[in-house]
Amino acid sequence: MKIAIFSDCYLDLTGGIVTTINAEKAELERRGHTVYVFSSAYPRSSAAKAKLAKSHIFPVPTCRLFGRGATPIARRPKIIEKWLLSSHPELKEFDIFYVHYEAGCSIAGIRLARALKIPSIQVMHGREDMGEALIIPPGLRTFVALVLNWFHSWYLPHPVKVKKDNYLAPTVARAKMWELMVNHANAADFVITPSDYFREMLLHYGLSRPNTALHHGVSNALVDFPATTKDYHQGETLEIIWHSRLSPEKRIMPFLEALTILQSTDKPQTLARATARMRYLKNRTKPAPKYHVSIFGDGPEIVSAKSYAKLHRLNVTFHGATKFDQIWEQLQVSHLDVLASYDYDTFGMSLIEAEAAGVPALITDPDLEEIIPPGSYLLTKSPSPRAIAAGINHLLAHPAEIASMSQVMLRNRHELKISVKIDKLERIMHEILG
């Protein structure tokens, strides 16, 4: 098959969507399919574009008003459609348009599929209602949501209207973001979500196109890697890894606050106790730190996170945005993976990367229990920093649980192979093609 992928989240970005597209493209090409990827991107030289083109990756026309550090934003869909037909007339002969995300490049992919009468699949990745609520300042949320809907409805019709409710749309802004998501999904011929719980949310708000939930996968090489059970023993340093964005929606600051609470349990309460502790420590080897956290990733809260960690003397190492190879190396020596997001993630790519390495997880959102096998994670009693600290303290007091959860991860990781997902995706594509 000839498959064209369209996404506003790919070039010059990191995250679950990028990882997913890379894994799918590699496996589809391994099976003999032709796969093109079109994405918004920062400006590049002709030589850099030519290098990308050898891998069938093509930057679409992108706004130049945004500097590095911001998400590259595609130009208006009609401009992209015109460029696509002019620069890539071979698209008329493609079999499937496979679309990720809901902004300019993605809208252009859906519209062009309709114009060329080519079947389209839309993958719905994110809770844009929560993303807008967490990123946009309170006084601007309704205005931004209305503008985004207005822009989107210029290019794709909005017959489904979503009103405020007591479920997932308690404000006008969040209702409008659900309206945008559902109408975008309904513009495609088939819709895929990464989880059942997100699919049910979209159905509740008006998703009407044929649809299914299809979990993401990771490279077969990761699953075939000879990972070992993660053992943790009393008195050792608990090695924790964070490899998500440092942002409000991923809740890096509540996690760091939890470490402060965890650390405070070691502080002496009285002068007499402090003096006795100092005498004791003089006569013995310094104990290993209770925990150490390796934080990988970048994001809008990286400066605040670093300042907070320094102020509270947290045992944290910031690695910044790094290649996955470095994250994978750290996963091999970690005891616990943390994903602190709540009511936001529709899948949690970092969780299955941890599962591939056999690393137990600590999660705060019960929805994410769908993603990893029962017995492989600890769900905190609430998303609060105090509950996160209590969860880590529980594992410190019950070290054998780490090995037990790790073994469950390793027993089930074969299900994560990207080849398993692509088997299912190929069947969907063949059914759509009739």
Image (spheres, grey):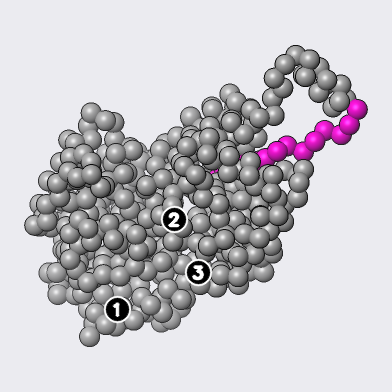
Residue at x 80% of width, y 36% of height: 287
Q: Position of residue 43 (x, y in %)?
A: 34, 48
* Callout 3 amino acid: Leu
Q: Secondary structure at mark 2?
A: helix
Q: Position of residue 370 (x, y in %)?
A: 44, 61
98 or 379: nearer the eye? Answer: 379
On the picture, is 378 further left or further right than 233?
A: left
Q: Is residue 199 magenta?
A: no
52 or 345: nearer the eye? Answer: 345
Say which label, 1 or 3, has the lower sequence index.
Answer: 3
Q: Residue at label 3?
A: 416
Instruction: State the extent of the magenta-drawn residues as a range.
Output: 283-296
Q: Position of residue 185 (x, y in %)?
A: 21, 61
Callout 1 touching callout 3 (CB < 8 Å):
no
Q: Residue at label 2?
A: 368
Callout 1 touching callout 2 (CB < 8 Å):
no
Residue at x 23% of width, y 61% of height: 203
* Callout 1 amino acid: Met
The image quadrant of residue 280 is top right
* Callout 2 amino acid: Leu
Mark 2 → mark 3, Cα distance in angstroms? 15 Å
